[in-house]
Amino acid sequence: MKHKKVVILGSTGSIGRNVLKVAAGFPEHFTVVGMTAGRNIDLLRQQIETFSPRVVSVAEEDAALKLKTLLGPGRQTEIVWGQKGNEQVACLTEADMVVSAIVGAAGLLPTFAAIRSGKDIALANKETLVMAGRLIMDEVKKKQVRLLPIDSEHSAIAQALEAGRKEDVARIILTASGGPFLHLAEENLWQVTPEKALDHPNWDMGRKISVDSATLMNKGLEVIEAHWLFDIALEKIEVLVHPQSIVHSLVEFIDGSVVAQLGIPDMRVPISYALSYPERLDTGLSRLNLTECSNLSFLKPDTNRFPALQIAYEACKTGGCMPTVLNAANEIAVAAFLEGKLKFPEISKVVRETLAHTKYMDDTDIETILDVDRLARIESAEVVRLMTKHAVRAD
Ligand code: NDP
């Protein structure tokens, strides 16, 4: 395999840490030349000491100053900060591949910059494709770079699609674990705490995606991600709940053949696939024992208890900037839920109301996307404010 120089955007996160584990296991294949993080300076410092990247970016200037002090004189790594810093690292001349693993809308601009500077992308930050799927895919084609998914479902679909021609695909079936509240009665969803929502049955993930998994918004975002990534009509993308998270997704072809990818639920598998594509690495991870999988089940998602999935389908169908609004409103609502301001079922309500208050706009360019994102955050914060005010009065 050709040696790859890799940049990791979001190195201190759940995905970022797993990417570093994979890279550390194969020093003959990967060198980490750049990293970015938000505020976790202590972990970032350890990562710098282990991997000696050439440039590192953090979110704020004060974090950059603190990091420089912690590292002390003599350390070769250049420290930069802010949006400009993120983009500088995303475009490092020597990098072959950029892993996009920042959470949320903050991942959009550095990922876009990396594509524009001709880097192959290993994409975990699904929000990038939700916010600006058409623009991103246009740029991917223009620059002829590879966009390889890290999301386990999309990694599964990418692998299954290799079994046939795109025009012979009948449908894509994305699997969803169903999250921690799969069997919880609708009225009990009002008592769900952030702590319970963060306790995912199969995956150990960051806070935002854990809540998205619990509401099923994560699957909604993934439907939109799949639509853009694989250029597949929305009507051909279905979701099935598969609580065991063993079958990571499936592709049905027109002859009735269904091709699936299976594996243990460990993000290092899709990460190593994206990093090493088109080759594969012997990850040394435990293998799937099929005799222990006698109980694989698949069920239709309950969109009454978990309306977020349907809301995401509708936003994607309307098109234009509506998925950008969906994403922004969801980020605001999830943050409000984690702060204890919103009840769990209100997350979807905030997203639905924000979409209802927003006028359709075309996804003309990145500046428009950023404007719509900013306005949708203001609107959804207002929806949260009114909803919580109302709740206090009702109490
Ligand atoms: P985490 O919350 O664990 O990590 C997020 C990373 O982004 C951290 O490195 C964080 O830095 C950084 N970050 C956050 N805000 C900013 C900002 N404003 N500027 C720069 N950096 C920032 O998230 P995950 O790793 O779980 O998820 C990352 C992405 O991958 C998400 O889009 C998620 O949907 C996707 N994904 C995650 C999976 C998983 O298993 N975790 C599976 C599939 C997709 P710091 O911590 O230093 O503040």
Image: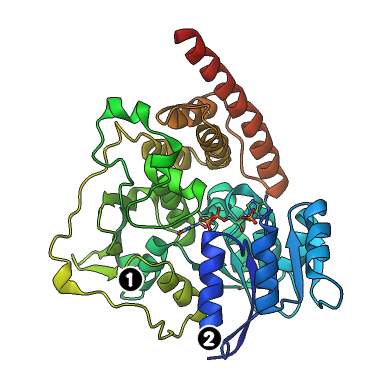
Res 344 visible: yes
Q: Which residue is pictured at 40% across the width and 69% down the height?
A: 158
- What residue type is disc 1 on? Ala
Tell me the residue that label 2 is attached to: 26
Tell me the residue that label 1 is attached to: 160
153 relative to 365 in the view: left or right:
left
Marks 1 and 2 sit apart, C-alpha to C-alpha, by 26 Å
Q: Is residue 120 above or below residue 342?
A: below
Percent x, y of residue 61? 82, 53
Residue 289: give its label.
none
User: Badge 2: how crowded within 10 Å, few (<14), some, or many (20+)?
Assistant: some
Q: Is residue 127 above or below residue 314?
A: below
Q: Where on the picture, by quarter, is residue 395?
A: top left
Q: Residue furthest top?
A: 393
Indicate the secondary structure of the residue bearing disc 2. loop
Indicate the secondary structure of the residue bearing disc 1. helix
Where ligand 1 lies, by image quadrant?
bottom right
Percent x, y of residue 205? 46, 55
Res 118 visible: no
